[in-house]
Every structure is written in structure tokens, then in C-alpha cells.
């Protein structure tokens, strides 16, 4: 099973979109194995966005991402990285298909609601950057139909 990192950016929190976004991942069949709200420091943001450091939007990006808390999530599932990228849609909300998270909730390239790891290597690095080992949980999902059937037999 693959794991991937998701950051629900400040605009998703400020626009009350957390539940709608998280339910899309759960409805798809992905399992939430890590979840926390955090305020990102300038040093963590500089490390996370180091690949954008020379770009003109870097300072605005760091300021935006530090402007309010984010929700960090680790999702697990079969081909989780590519599945999450499809659910998110392209970086620019204006270019994202209706039905994708960015297509439904964003008109911006930078204030685009969500960050998702783009490769297995990036996911592994990003998960370590935002989560300690004891903040990632390994658990079995309950088969509620079996539980309900057992209760009916009792």
C-alpha cells in the first residue's frame, strides 16, 4: 500500500471546506492514517518549497502558507499517490476539471486549496517532514456489515 501526504492549505480551512475535501478521499476508499492541524514555520516552508526558492512567487507562497493553520494528512491505499493527484486536479484551479477538488473549489494557481505529493520519493520525504513515526497509524478498517450481521445473530 502506498502512502501520500496531503496539506489542506489555509484557504481550505478559511472557506470551511475541510469536511467536503476529506470526505472525497474517504469516499474514494483511501484510508486516513495520519491527521493533524499545524501552523507551519518559515523554516519548514522553506524546506518544503525549496524547489520554488528562485521563482518570483516564492515569498508570497511562504507568506500564504504561514498565514493560518493547515491540515496535514497521510492517506494510504492502492496507488494512493496517483489516485490523490487525480482527485486534486491540476495545480491551477481554472484549468482543473469540474469534479476535482481544485476544479470545484479554486480559481487560483497558488491559492489552490491543497498540496499532494507528486511521486513516491516526494511522498516519503514529505511524510517524514510533517509527521513523526508515532503519528502514523496502522489499523484495520472495520467491516461494518459483518459486525451488524453478528449483532443480528445475537
Image (cartoon, rainbow, N blue to C red):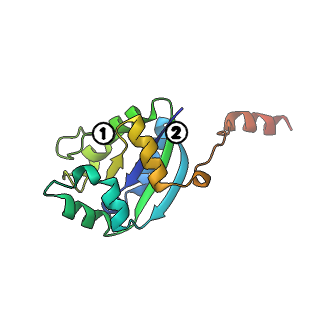
> Mark 2 or mark 1: which comes first in sequence?
2
Q: 147 or 130: which is nearer to us?
A: 130
Going 24% across and 44% down the picture, which residue do you hit?
91
- Which residue in the protein does label 1 denote? 99
Under circle 1, the secondary element is loop
Please tell me whether residue 21 is drawn above or below residue 81 in the rendered image: below
Packing grade of label 2 (10 A; few <14, some 14-19, many >=20) is: many
| Residue 83 shown left or right of residue 32 in the figure | left
Residue 64, given in percent of the width and then of the height, sits at 26, 65
Going 45% across and 55% down the picture, which residue do you hit?
72
Q: Give the residue furthest to the top.
A: 78
Please tell me whether residue 57 is drawn above or below residue 153 in the rendered image: below
Q: Give the residue furthest to the right.
A: 154
| Residue 26 shown left or right of residue 107 in the figure | right
| Residue 77 shown left or right of residue 47 in the figure | right
Residue 76 image label? 2
Amino acid at each position: 500500500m502506498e502512502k501520500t501526504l496531503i496539506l489542506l492549505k489555509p484557504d481550505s480551512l478559511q472557506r470551511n471546506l475541510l469536511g467536503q475535501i476529506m470526505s472525497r478521499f474517504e469516499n474514494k476508499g483511501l484510508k486516513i492514517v495520519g491527521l493533524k492541524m499545524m501552523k507551519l514555520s518559515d523554516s519548514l516552508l522553506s524546506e518544503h518549497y525549496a524547489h520554488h526558492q528562485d521563482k518570483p512567487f516564492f515569498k508570497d507562497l511562504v507568506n500564504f502558507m504561514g498565514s493560518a493553520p493547515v491540515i496535514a494528512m497521510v492517506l494510504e491505499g492502492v496507488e494512493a499517490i496517483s489516485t490523490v493527484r487525480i482527485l486534486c486536479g491540476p495545480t491551477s484551479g481554472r484549468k482543473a476539471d469540474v469534479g476535482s477538488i481544485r476544479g470545484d473549489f479554486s480559481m487560483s494557481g497558488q491559492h489552490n486549496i491543497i498540496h499532494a505529493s507528486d511521486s513516491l520519493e516526494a511522498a516519503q520525504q514529505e511524510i517524514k517532514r510533517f509527521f513523526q513515526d508515532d503519528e502514523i497509524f496502522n489499523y484495520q478498517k472495520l467491516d461494518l456489515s459483518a459486525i451488524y450481521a453478528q449483532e443480528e445473530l445475537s
